[in-house]
Image (spheres, rainbow, N blue to C red):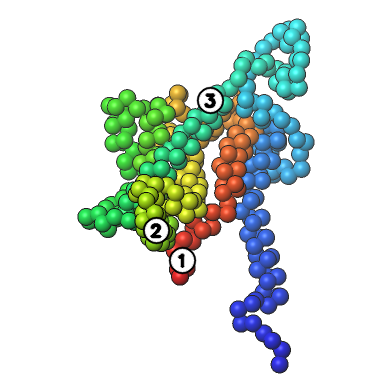
């Protein structure tokens, strides 16, 4: 009799599973690859029908994204020849660069608001989760359900009250206002995720630290936080993804000073209408920070999704 494992899949099943995983990855990556490719197309190629898969790449979209341009007469263009490669791209369209665009400012706003709200959400969520996990709080289950219920309603349902409140408090179109709003929205997710991780940390570790002379805060900082690092990292990823991609509140509550990249990118207009190469270039660049952040913490992401599924 040949040995056979009931838990080890056969070679054929492994091959089928591998094919399915590769096919699924290609399907899910196709929109991202198409956006990336569109950023290197010219304006006619980006709207060609049928769509062009093979095309001559150009950096026109990225130049249009980062520069503001104005049309000039042929005499002016002849008298002022381009001196750089990006000026030459603009010059070929009968335009000159008038200065930088506002994409850099909007991108910086996304960084400030996204990472700022993520830090506050994780910081406050860690403290609240520790309290819910370790102390006897009256009506604890009701409070936890109330915190979770704030995620059940669609954001548009509270958009008008928040708009009126922000206008009264002077928080409209401010970095502080958007950071506070995204922190409030993300806090429920942060508390619930981190409470699950802290519940898995044995209380005996803290009790041993208290016996050794540590204060409660020292035990929390030196014992609980290192053990909960995986949960904190995975929670930060989820909070950042929401704050980074949020669109509805950004459209309603910002217009200039604190406007983020998501509502700005679709408004990029070219000579003949929507500048799709510039829009695709902006979307491609906008994906980079959150993608890098997620890749750096990818080891913690899977456990953040599946925490509590297997318990000893």
Left or right of 295 on screen, residue 214: left
Residue 139 point in image, percent of width and height: 22, 56
Residue 61 in percent (x, y) is at 66, 30
Label annotation for residue 105: 3
Q: Is residue 54 visible?
A: yes
Marks 1 and 3 sit apart, C-alpha to C-alpha, by 43 Å
Q: Name the residue tied to disc 2.
A: 208
Element marked by disc 3: helix
Which residue position holds label 1?
309
Q: Residue furthest left?
A: 138
Front disc: 2 or 3 = 2
In the rendered image, the residue lying farthest to the bottom is 1
For the image, the number of numbered tags is 3
* Residue for point 44% across, 63% down: 308
**Is residue 154 something that shows in the picture?**
no
Q: Which one is in front in this view, the residue at disc 1 or the one at disc 3?
A: 1
Q: Position of residue 63 (x, y in %)?
A: 67, 26
Q: Is residue 132 above or below residue 15?
A: above
Counting residues from the start of the chain, the first of labels 1 and 3 encountered is 3
* Residue at the spot 72% in from the left edge and 22% down from the top edge: 86
The residue at the point 46 percent across, 45 percent down is 239
Comparing 112 with 67, the one in front is: 112
Q: Is residue 8 above or below residue 198?
A: below
Sort mark 3 into few (<14), some (14-19) or many (20+) by Cα contacts within 10 Å. Answer: some
Callout 1: helix, strand or loop?
loop
């Amino acid at each position: 009799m040949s040995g056979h494992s009931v838990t080890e899949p056969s070679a054929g099943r492994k091959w089928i599973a591998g094919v399915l995983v590769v096919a699924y990855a290609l399907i899910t990556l196709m929109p991202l690859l198409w956006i990336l490719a569109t950023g290197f197309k010219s304006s006619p190629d980006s709207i060609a029908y049928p769509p062009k898969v093979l095309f001559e790449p150009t950096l026109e979209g990225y130049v249009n994204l980062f520069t503001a341009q104005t049309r000039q007469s042929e005499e002016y263009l002849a008298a002022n020849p381009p001196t750089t490669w990006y000026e030459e791209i603009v010059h070929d369209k009968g335009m000159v660069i008038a200065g930088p665009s506002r994409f850099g400012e909007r991108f910086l706003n996304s960084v400030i608001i996204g990472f700022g709200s993520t830090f506050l959400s994780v910081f406050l969520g860690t403290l609240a989760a520790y309290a819910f996990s370790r102390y006897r709080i009256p009506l604890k289950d009701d409070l936890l359900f109330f915190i979770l219920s704030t995620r059940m309603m669609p954001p548009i349902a509270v958009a008008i009250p928040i708009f009126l409140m922000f206008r009264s408090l002077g928080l409209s179109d401010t970095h502080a206002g958007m950071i506070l709003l995204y922190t409030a929205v993300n806090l429920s997710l942060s508390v619930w995720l981190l409470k699950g991780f802290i519940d898995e940390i044995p209380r005996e570790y803290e009790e041993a630290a208290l016996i050794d002379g540590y204060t409660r805060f020292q035990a929390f900082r030196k014992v609980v936080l290192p053990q909960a690092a995986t949960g904190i990292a995975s929670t930060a990823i989820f909070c950042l993804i929401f704050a980074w991609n949020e669109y509805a509140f950004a459209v309603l509550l910002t217009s200039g000073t604190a406007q983020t990249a998501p509502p700005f990118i679709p408004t990029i207009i070219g000579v003949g209408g929507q500048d799709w190469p510039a829009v695709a270039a902006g979307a491609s660049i906008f994906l980079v920070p959150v993608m890098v952040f997620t890749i750096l913490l990818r080891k913690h992401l899977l456990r953040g999704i599946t925490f509590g599924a297997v318990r000893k």
